Amino acid sequence: MTNIDTPDSSLHHLYSPFAALVEAAIAEADHECAGKYTGFVRWSPFETYRSQARQEWLYAQGRTRPGPIVTYKRGAVGLHPAGLACDAVWFDEKGVPHWDGPYAMWQTLGHCARAQGLAWGGDFPSFKDLPHLQPTPAQQIEWLPSARAYLHSLGLD
């Protein structure tokens, strides 16, 4: 990805053991939400890998750039720059991504993520990040070195 204003939604830019769990959680959430919620068609990754430059660009939103605050992290911190985070959103029949919708729908995504052994941003104690999926703390410790090496091999570090 070269444009800081464009999210990278590629599962191939996530560390593969994590990507497999994300893919399974999303497939399960699709199955659970299909036909239950008006306008819902599918869950999909919206942003996976995030460069340091994009993280800074997003951090500026709501501060020095117009728009609502969407992140509280600056620079190469967090798990997106390591290929260990995915923001999933739901899409309607016109292919439009959504960050809204019934809380129960987002809870379904969280339940499906937890069922795959992942952490869900809706469980965060302070900033509730409903679209966010990431490894558990134990997985982070285990996967971080290999995830960084993988991104380096792709030229994304």
Image (cartoon, rainbow, N blue to C red):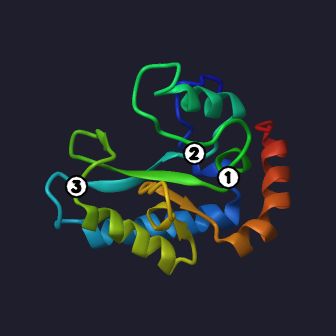
Query: Given the image, on which type of amino acid does mark 1 rest?
Result: Leu
**Residue drawn at the location 70% of the way across and 44% of the way down:** 81
Residue that label 2 marks: 10
Check the picture and name the quadrant holding the N terminus.
Answer: top right
* Residue of label 1: 79
Callout 2–callout 3 Cβ contact below 8 Å: no
128 w.r.t. 4: above or below: below
- Left or right side of 16 for 25: left
Marks 2 and 3, how far apart in space? 21 Å
Which image quarter is the C terminus in?
Answer: top right
Badge nearest the viewer, 1 or 2: 1
Please name the residue shown 65% across and 24% down the image: 2
Work out how far the residue at label 1 is from the one at label 2, CA to CA, in angstroms: 15 Å
- According to the picture, the residue beneath numbered tag 3 turns out to be 40
Secondary structure of the residue carrying tag 2 is loop
Q: CA distance from mark 3 to mark 1?
A: 28 Å
